[in-house]
Image (cartoon, helix red, strand yellow):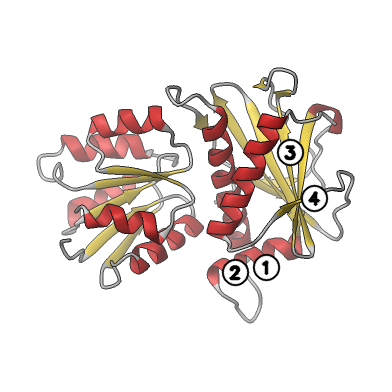
Amino acid sequence: MIQCDTTVKAAMVNAVTETMENMAFEQVEEATDENVVQSGNVIWASLPVIRPSAAEISIELSNDYAKAVTEALFGFSENGPDETIVNDALAEMLNTIGGRFMAQLTPAQQEFELGLPKVGTGKTKISPNDVAAVNFNVGEYILRVYIAGLDPQKGILINPVAQEGSDENSGR
Amino acid sequence: MKPLSCIIIADDSTTARMIIRRCLEIAGADTATFLEAKDGKEALELAKNNDVQLLVTDLNMPNMDGQSLLRHIKSSPKLSELPVLIISSASNDAKQSGLLDMGAFAILGKPVTPANLAKIIERL
């Protein structure tokens, strides 16, 4: 696992905190245990960064938490939220996190561009050697954020990481 | 503030459209009719065929993105006066400057809140 430099890590903590508080009304805290394990079925979303350099930001969380967030946004229903809506909520959450993250790391006079998010179920095939990870506690749940394409020495986003081997769709 | 009787919200995310609508309602547009579009093409058709007071759009959408939508609106004699509010995650000072030059009424970053939307619609 790559170690985030402090600027990148602070940008991600700010992005996740601001997004979760404003969008999902959730208080999040950075987890102190870096090796915490997700329990139960897992869902992920992935967002490519196209400019100023290629990178990828992913989030991973339990299905139960994804459903809980969706219900917080849309209201409760008897049969729980539809999978399409869960995927859409997750994609929008990541889109907002990615935007807040890149806005902090990109110089004000330079534009950045994000791709369209994808959502999938099952474990991601991210190689731990290629990414930095930041974990968050959200109540009883864990929200894990991966940043691929990061040079921790220079804080430069350099290479994307593909999500392979699990079921995925556009999330929208 | 002019009464907003009809507002278009263009975003490819159902979640984003719902959040923006709720925030606009809290910000004072609670009596408006909301028309929703999944991309710029749909939004442009809705704008052409309805008496709309505000168009709220995302930037990053399939088919026609928000920047192309803004360009179409501002180049249309019938629609050029329609205020276009852009709400996007991919927004920073450089992007905002270019969009304001193109004729955008205002630009907000996501996550949007009722408070920052209220400041925008007060200016309409």
Same-subunit check for callouts 2 and 1 = yes
Identity of the residue furthest to the left in this view: B77
Dots 2, 1 in contact, CB < 8 A: yes
Amino acid residing under circle 2: Ala
| Numbered label tally | 4
N-terminal label among 3 and 2: 2
Q: Can residue A169 be seen in this view?
A: no
Picture coordinates of residue B28 (x, y %)? Answer: 29, 67
Q: What element carries label 1?
A: helix
Same-subunit check for callouts 2 and 4 = yes
Q: Which sits in the foreground, A135 or B56?
A: A135
Picture coordinates of residue B121 (x, y %)? Answer: 26, 56
Residue A27 relative to residue B5: left or right: right
Amino acid residing under circle 3: Tyr
Crowd around label 4: few <14 · some 14–19 · many ≥20 (10 Å): some
For the residues marked 2 and 4, what is the alpha-carbon distance in whole angstroms? 22 Å
Q: Mark 3 points at which residue?
A: A146
Rendered image: mark on residue A68: 1
Query: Label 3 marks which chain's residue?
Result: A
Q: Mark 4 points at which residue?
A: A31
Query: Label 1 marks which chain's residue?
Result: A
Q: Given this view, does label 2 or label 4 mark the residue nearer the observer?
A: 4
Q: Which sits in the foreground, A104 or B104?
A: A104
Amino acid residing under circle 1: Ala
Residue at point 21%, 63% (across, down): B4
Q: Name the residue under label 2.
A: A72
Picture coordinates of residue B42 (x, y %)? Answer: 33, 50
For the residues marked 4 and 3, what is the alpha-carbon distance in whole angstroms? 14 Å
Crowd around label 3: few <14 · some 14–19 · many ≥20 (10 Å): many
N-terminal label among 4 and 3: 4
